[in-house]
Image (cartoon, rainbow, N blue to C red):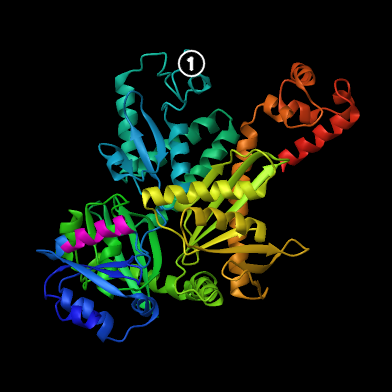
C-alpha cells in the first residue's frame, strides 16, 4: 500500500504526516520536494529514532503547498494541532527571564517571563538572561542606587523606602520630572550596554559611605561593584555595533543534534541556550524547524547569524528578521565558538542521554514486550488519598513514551467522602473517561491503578459500562510496601517483576509520581478545610463540643499546639487523644 502511494507523490513542496496503525499522526514534516523526502524514509538506510519512527508507520498523508514557506507554516500548525509523538522539539516550554522597565504611572523595574509573545508588545524589555540570579541581582542593585518605586499597591503614607531615600514617595508626593528623567536615562543607558554609568554611580555611593564612616554599607557596595566587573568582563565580545543578535550553531553526531544559541545584546554576550535532541527527519530540516519553534516562544533580536548550510531566505521569511551567514571576522569566531560549545555539550552529555533513553523510552518498550502489547505510547496512572475517610481525592498522571506529560495531569475531588477505595476508583475512572469520550480526547494504551484486584475490578466495571476496551494493570506491593508484582486485566495473572530491571524502576517512578501528585493535592484540600469541617471528622465531637473548641482555640493550628490537658478541659481524654491523632495525620 505504501509503495503504491509513494508512486503518486508529486515533486512539489508540502507537508507530510506519518500515521500508525490506529490512524494516529505520529510525525509531521515539511519538504521542498515531497516525493524525494517521503521516499527517503522507505528507500534509504535509517537508524536511531528515524528507524523507530519508520517501524511504526502504517500509512502517510501529504498536503501540497505553493512554496516551501507555506509548507513550513503548515508543518508548525499541524504539530501544534496533533502534538505528534516524534515531533519532540521544544516541549519543555522553558522561557528565560527579562528585565522590564515600566515608566508609567511610576518608574520601576521587575523580572518577567512572558510565555505569550503577544504580551511582550510595546514593553521595554532587556535580555534574555539565562542566569536568572544575575537578572535579580542587577534589578536589586538598581533599586538600591536609584529611587524607583519598590512597593506594591498605593499606600496612603510614605513607606520606609522613602525615609531611607530609595524612593521618591510616588504614591503620596509629586516627584520632579527632571530627576525622574535623569534616573531613567541612567538606568536605560546601563541596560543598553553602557556599564560605566552603573560603575560610576557605585563608586560615588562607596565614597559617600566611606567618608561618613559607614564602612559596612561601603563594603556591601564594593562587593556589588566587584560582581558587576566580573559579569561585564565575562560578557565582553569584540563587536562594536551594539546590534542585538543571536549566534546559532549546532553539532551532529551519533544520531543526535546539539544546538547552541548565543544571546548578544548591546555588544555583550548575556548567555546561551543549549539543547540536545535525536534526529528524526534530516539534519537541515530538523535544525530549521527547531530554530523557528524556538523563536515562537522567545524574543527575536535584530539579526540571526547561522551556519552556511541553513536556508537564510526561508528562515528570514518565516521569522520576519534578518538571517545571515558569516565567513570571516569576529562573527565567524563567535559562530565557531558556538559550534565548539555544541560539540562539547553533546560529548559531555551523550552517556547521560543514552542512559536516560534506556530508563524512559527503553523501559517503556520493555513493558510493552512484557505485556505483549502492539502499542504503548501513553499510560494513565491513578492513585486515591483520604484521611479517615474524609477529604477524599484522586490524582492522574500521564507518561508518554516513558516520560511524564505534566500538562495532561488531572486532579479529582471525590464526592464519596468515606474510606471506600472501590467507589472512589469507580468515580474517578468514570469522570475521566466519560469526559474523554465526550471531548474526543486521547485515550491511553494502558491504565495503571495503585492496588490489587479490587481496584482493577472497579476500573474495569466502569470501562465496560462506557464500552471502552482498555488494558488495565494493578501495581501490587509486598510486605515491605514495595511494588513487586503487576496484575494484568487480560488474564488476571500476576507477573513478578525483577527489582533490578528497567521495568521495575519505571513502574516505581510512575507509582511515586502519581502518589506525590495526589498527596500534594490532598494536602492542599486539607489546608483549605475550615476548623468546623475538621472537627466534624473526629468521632466524639458533636455540635456542643465543636462550639466550645472553636470558642476557646479559634483555629486548627491553635488546637494542634494545645496540650492534652488543655483539650481535656472541654472534651474527654479518649476524644482528645483521637483529635490529636487526627491532626497529626493531617500534617503528614
Residue 498 position (above or below residue 80): below
Total residue callouts? 1
Residue 489 magenta:
no
The image quadrant that residue 104 belongs to is top left
Name the side, left or right, on which 40 lies relative to 224: left
Task: Say few, some or many: other residues with alpha carbon within 10 Å of mark 1 (under 14 / 14 to 19 / 20 or more).
Answer: some
Quarter of the rendering containing residue 543: top right
* Whole-percent x, y for residue 181 in the image: 30, 27
Task: Let me know if residue 76 is in the magenta part.
Answer: yes
Is any atom of residue 333 visible in this view? no
Residue 352, above or below 208? below
Residue 564 in sight here: yes
Seen from the viewer's position, the closer of residues 407 and 209 is 407
The one of 143 and 394 positioned closer to us in this rendering: 394
- Compared across the picture, whether 542 is left or right of 449 comes to right
Compared with 232, 306 (above or below) is: below
**Quarter that holds the C terminus:** top right
| Above or below for 33 versus 88 | below
Q: Main secondary structure of the magenta part?
A: helix
Q: Which quadrant of the figure has residue 30?
A: bottom left
Residue 67 relative to residue 463: left or right: left
Element at badge 1? Answer: loop
The image position of residue 478, as x and y in percent, is 74, 65
Residue 102 at x, y percent in the picture:
34, 31
**Can you give x and y, in whole percent of width and height, for residue 353 in the image?**
48, 72
The magenta span reads 71-82
Residue in the image at 62% along x and 62% along y: 474
What residue lies at 59% left-to-right and 64% top-to-bottom?
Answer: 473
Q: Dot 1 corresponds to which residue?
A: 158
Amino acid at each position: 500500500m505504501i509503495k503504491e502511494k509513494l508512486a503518486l507523490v508529486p515533486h512539489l513542496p508540502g507537508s507530510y504526516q506519518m500515521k500508525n496503525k490506529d490512524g494516529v499522526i505520529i510525525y509531521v514534516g515539511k519538504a521542498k520536494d515531497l516525493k524525494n523526502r517521503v521516499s527517503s524514509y522507505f528507500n534509504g538506510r535509517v537508524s536511531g529514532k528515524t528507524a523507530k519512527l519508520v517501524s511504526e508507520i502504517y500509512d502517510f498523508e501529504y498536503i501540497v503547498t505553493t512554496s516551501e514557506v507555506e509548507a513550513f507554516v503548515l508543518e508548525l500548525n499541524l504539530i501544534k494541532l496533533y502534538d505528534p509523538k516524534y515531533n519532540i522539539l521544544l516541549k519543555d516550554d522553558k522561557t528565560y527571564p527579562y528585565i522590564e522597565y515600566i515608566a508609567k504611572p511610576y518608574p520601576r523595574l521587575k523580572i518577567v517571563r512572558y510565555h505569550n509573545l503577544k504580551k511582550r508588545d510595546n514593553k521595554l524589555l532587556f535580555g534574555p538572561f539565562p542566569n536568572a540570579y544575575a537578572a535579580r541581582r542587577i534589578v536589586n542593585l538598581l533599586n538600591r542606587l536609584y529611587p524607583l518605586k519598590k512597593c506594591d499597591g498605593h499606600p496612603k503614607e510614605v513607606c520606609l523606602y522613602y525615609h531611607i531615600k530609595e524612593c521618591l514617595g510616588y504614591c503620596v508626593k509629586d516627584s520632579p520630572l527632571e530627576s525622574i528623567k535623569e534616573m531613567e536615562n541612567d538606568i536605560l543607558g546601563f541596560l543598553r550596554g553602557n556599564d560605566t554609568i552603573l560603575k560610576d554611580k557605585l563608586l560615588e555611593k562607596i565614597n559617600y559611605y566611606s567618608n561618613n564612616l559607614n564602612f559596612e554599607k561601603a563594603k556591601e557596595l564594593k562587593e556589588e561593584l566587584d560582581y558587576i566587573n566580573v559579569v561585564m568582563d565575562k560578557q565582553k565580545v569584540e563587536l562594536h555595533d551594539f546590534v542585538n543578535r543571536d549566534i546559532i550553531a549546532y553539532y551532529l553526531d551519533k544520531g543526535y543534534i546539539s544546538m547552541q544559541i548565543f544571546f548578544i545584546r548591546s555588544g555583550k554576550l548575556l548567555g546561551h541556550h543549549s539543547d540536545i535532541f535525536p534526529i528524526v527527519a534530516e539534519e537541515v530540516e530538523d535544525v530549521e524547524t527547531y530554530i523557528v519553534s524556538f523563536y515562537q516562544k522567545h524574543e527575536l533580536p535584530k539579526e540571526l547569524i547561522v551556519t552556511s548550510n541553513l536556508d537564510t531566505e526561508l528562515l528570514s521569511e518565516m521569522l520576519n528578521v534578518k538571517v545571515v551567514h558569516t565567513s570571516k571576522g569576529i562573527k565567524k569566531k563567535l559562530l565557531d565558538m558556538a559550534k565548539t560549545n555544541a560539540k562539547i555539550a553533546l560529548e559531555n552529555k551523550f552517556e547521560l542521554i543514552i542512559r536516560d533513553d534506556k530508563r524512559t523510552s527503553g523501559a517503556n518498550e520493555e513493558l510493552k514486550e512484557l505485556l505483549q502489547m502492539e502499542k504503548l505510547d501513553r499510560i494513565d496512572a491513578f492513585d486515591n488519598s483520604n484521611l479517615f475517610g474524609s477529604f477524599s481525592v484522586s490524582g492522574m498522571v500521564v507518561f508518554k513514551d516513558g516520560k511524564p506529560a505534566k500538562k495532561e495531569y488531572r486532579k479529582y475531588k471525590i464526592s464519596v467522602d468515606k474510606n471506600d477505595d472501590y467507589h472512589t476508583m469507580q468515580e474517578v475512572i468514570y469522570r475521566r473517561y466519560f469526559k474523554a469520550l465526550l471531548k474526543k480526547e486521547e485515550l491511553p494504551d494502558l491504565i495503571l491503578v495503585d492496588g490489587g484486584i479490587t481496584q482493577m475490578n472497579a476500573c474495569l466495571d466502569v470501562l465496560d459500562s462506557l464500552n471502552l476496551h482498555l488494558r488495565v494493570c494493578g501495581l501490587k506491593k509486598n510486605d515491605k510496601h514495595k511494588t513487586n508484582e503487576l496484575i494484568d486485566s487480560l488474564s488476571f495473572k500476576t507477573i513478578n517483576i525483577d527489582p533490578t530491571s528497567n521495568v521495575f524502576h519505571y513502574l516505581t517512578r510512575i507509582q511515586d509520581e502519581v502518589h506525590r501528585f495526589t498527596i500534594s493535592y490532598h494536602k492542599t484540600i486539607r489546608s483549605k478545610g475550615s476548623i468546623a469541617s475538621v472537627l466534624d471528622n473526629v468521632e466524639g465531637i458533636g455540635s456542643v463540643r465543636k462550639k466550645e473548641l472553636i470558642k476557646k482555640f479559634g483555629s486548627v493550628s491553635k488546637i494542634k499546639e494545645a496540650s492534652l490537658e488543655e483539650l481535656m478541659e472541654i472534651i474527654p481524654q479518649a476524644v482528645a487523644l483521637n483529635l490529636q491523632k487526627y491532626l497529626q495525620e493531617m500534617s503528614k
